[in-house]
């Protein structure tokens, strides 16, 4: 049986705590009692953990043995900022699919009011990835960077394979590009997804100059959030 998994808010070498809403949920709704055992992620490591005390403000565990945990997909997503409800759905699904890092990018065609509101929205995005990571039983929480302009984002990528998802690309597909690289050589993949209006020609040029290859997900035009999900699913299958 799989035990319910929690991501600790604070920890020491031998203990971990859940606070705030998580503690309230565990104590009040699930009625956690001392002695009960859960899986708890502390400092990025998954442990078997036993409840020592539970109030609706804090649930404290002692950490027992470390458990084996699956690792994130080595995928860094550069996601243009677009309509928040759609974008947030994409962020949640990308987390479920294993994304390691998300950099929100203010693209040329990101609507002005969204670009202005993005900096304040990032806390919400971090909450979404945290909840989605826990729900999908990940043992790590993807990093979500502060929103940045395209040029800045390009400098934040360390992945060796850099792929710009572009509906204008007719031939080179994401899967053929990944298949042509030896998996052992894949020191991470970066995927860039444009906003609702797509990347401008100028932006596409900038990506190219920085070593990004253009790839397609097929002949249909996908919404940005669909492209993010499809792109990660292909990476998950190929890596
Ligand atoms: N400019 C387009 C829409 C852009 S879709 C239009 O005609 O309205 C938003 C983003 O999703 C794109 O920037 C691209 O990154 C991604 N995308 C959509 N369809 C794609 C496809 N078939 N292949 C690769 N990427 C795609």
Image (spheres, rainbow, N blue to C red):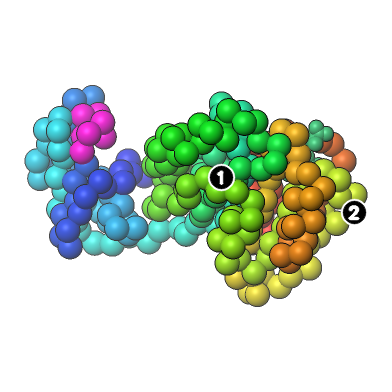
Could you say which quadrant of the image residue 130 lies in? top left
On whether residue 162 falls in the magenta region, the answer is no
Give the residue drawn at x 73%, y 53%. Answer: 164
Residue 50 image point, x, y percent: 17, 48
Residue 25 image point, x, y percent: 25, 29
Q: Callout 1: helix, strand or loop? A: strand
In the image, taking residue 15 as reference, residue 6 lies left or right, namely: right
Residue 209 image point, x, y percent: 76, 64
**Badge 1: few (under 14), some or many (20 or more) residues near its Cα, within 10 Å?**
many
Q: Callout 2: helix, strand or loop? A: loop
Q: Which residues are magenta?
A: 19-25
Q: Earlier in the sequence, mark 2 or mark 1?
A: 1
Q: Is residue 130 above or below residue 41?
A: above
One can see residue 131 in this view: no
In the image, taking residue 235 as reference, residue 122 lies left or right, namely: left
Give the residue drawn at x 87%, y 41%. Answer: 219
Query: In this figure, what is the number of numbered marks?
Result: 2
One can see residue 43 in this view: yes
**Residue marked by disc 1:** 104
Q: Main secondary structure of the magenta part?
A: helix
Give the residue drawn at x 20%, y 54%. Answer: 11
- Pick the front one: 232 or 136: 232
CB at disc 2 and ligand 1 closer than 8 Å: no
**Badge 2: few (under 14), some or many (20 or more) residues near its Cα, within 10 Å?**
few
**Residue marked by disc 2:** 171
In the image, taking residue 171 as reference, residue 195 lies left or right, namely: left
């Amino acid at each position: 049986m799989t035990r319910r998994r929690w991501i600790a808010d604070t920890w020491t070498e031998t203990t971990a705590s859940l606070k705030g809403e998580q503690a309230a949920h565990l104590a009040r709704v699930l009625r956690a009692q001392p002695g009960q055992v859960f899986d708890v992620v502390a400092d990025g490591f998954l442990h078997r953990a036993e409840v020592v005390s539970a109030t609706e403000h804090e649930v404290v565990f002692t950490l027992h043995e470390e458990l084996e945990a699956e690792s994130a997909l080595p995928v860094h997503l550069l996601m243009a900022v677009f309509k928040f409800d759609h974008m947030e759905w994409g962020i949640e699904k990308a987390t479920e699919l294993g994304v390691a890092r998300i950099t929100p990018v203010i693209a040329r065609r990101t609507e002005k009011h969204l670009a202005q509101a993005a900096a304040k929205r990032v806390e919400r995005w971090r909450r979404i990835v945290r909840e989605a990571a826990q729900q999908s039983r990940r043992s790590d929480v993807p990093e979500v960077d502060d929103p940045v302009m395209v040029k800045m984002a390009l400098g934040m990528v360390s992945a060796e394979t850099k792929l710009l998802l572009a509906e204008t690309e007719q031939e080179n597909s994401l899967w053929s590009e990944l298949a042509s690289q030896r998996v052992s050589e894949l020191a991470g993949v970066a995927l860039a997804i444009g906003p609702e209006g797509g990347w401008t020609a100028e932006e596409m040029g900038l990506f190219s100059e920085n070593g990004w290859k253009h790839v397609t997900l097929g002949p249909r035009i996908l919404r940005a959030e669909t492209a993010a999900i499809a792109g990660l699913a292909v990476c998950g299958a190929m890596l």
